Image (cartoon, rainbow, N blue to C red):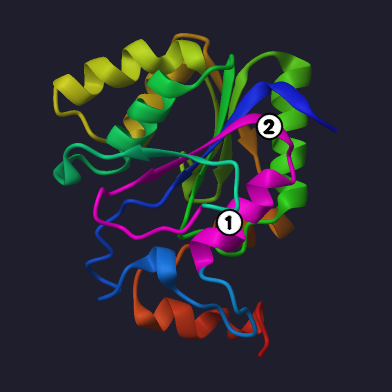
Amino acid sequence: MKRPDLTTALLAGGESARMGTDKAFLHLPGREAPLYQLQLEKLARLEPRAALLSARPEQDLDVEDMEVHLVPDQDRDLGPLEGLCRCLERCPTPWLLVLAVDLPCMTAAFLERLADRAHEHAIGLVPESAHGVEPLCAVYPKSLYSLARLRLRREQRSLRGLTAEGIEHGLLQAMPLKEEEEVLMTNVNCPRDLEQLTQYFPS
């Protein structure tokens, strides 16, 4: 189902310091394509009006065969908030579905349900796990841009802080995850995390 009111954005510009190599180019067990391409393919399943890719200018991300617009970071020290803020600025639709590159267990089916529920209730949605809200896989309203930009200027870089403010302003709503959905929010920050993914991606 095409979603003309939705833009997707993959956040892939992190420094990957703890991993020791760019997480966007990680190869999961049994998968030939690098992680960023796998994530873009999941987002493409939503058939959004536009697709954005937030990345550092020096990253050599091949998107020639994909209908994806690159959104380069301007300051690598500002974290994912800058990527989100710039994508909200470039977003041509009322809604922006954001996914971080380092959530390899995320499924297209869950992203579709998230987008459908946000559309049905006409509000931004942030999944909430046992660890709190998960702002790196969420649907944000375009109208959140002013709050994101203000927090960036104040060097308030916490995405959870932004989501809390968005909820307070009635722009966002937390969506509690089912127990079996918690694994979808598993991220990879270091080589050990990648090794533990073999149970989900058997080679």
> Magenta segment range?
35-63
Residue at (22% x, 67% y) in the render: 17
Residue at (46% x, 58% y) in the render: 62
Q: Is 199 on the left-hand or right-hand side of 101?
A: right
Residue hosting label 2: 48
Circle 2: residue type: Pro
Pick the quarter of the image with the N terminus.
top right
Write down the quadrant of residue 74 in the picture.
Answer: top left
Q: Which mark is residue 39?
A: 1
Q: Nearer the viewer, residue 108 or 65?
A: 65
Q: Nearer the viewer, residue 163 or 17?
A: 17
Question: Residue 171: horizontal and vertical position, in percent?
Answer: 52, 13
| Disc 2 to disc 1, C-alpha distance | 14 Å
Residue at (56% x, 60% y) in the render: 37
Question: Do labels 2 and 1 touch, CB within 8 Å?
Answer: no
Write down the quadrant of residue 49 in the picture.
Answer: top right
Q: Nearer the viewer, residue 32 or 127?
A: 32
Q: Is 139 on the left-hand or right-hand side of 49?
A: left
Q: Secondary structure at mark 2?
A: strand
**Badge 2: how crowded within 10 Å, few (<14), some, or many (20+)?**
many
Question: Residue 134: horizontal and vertical position, in percent?
Answer: 49, 43
In the rendered image of this protein, does residue 83 appear above or below residue 49? below
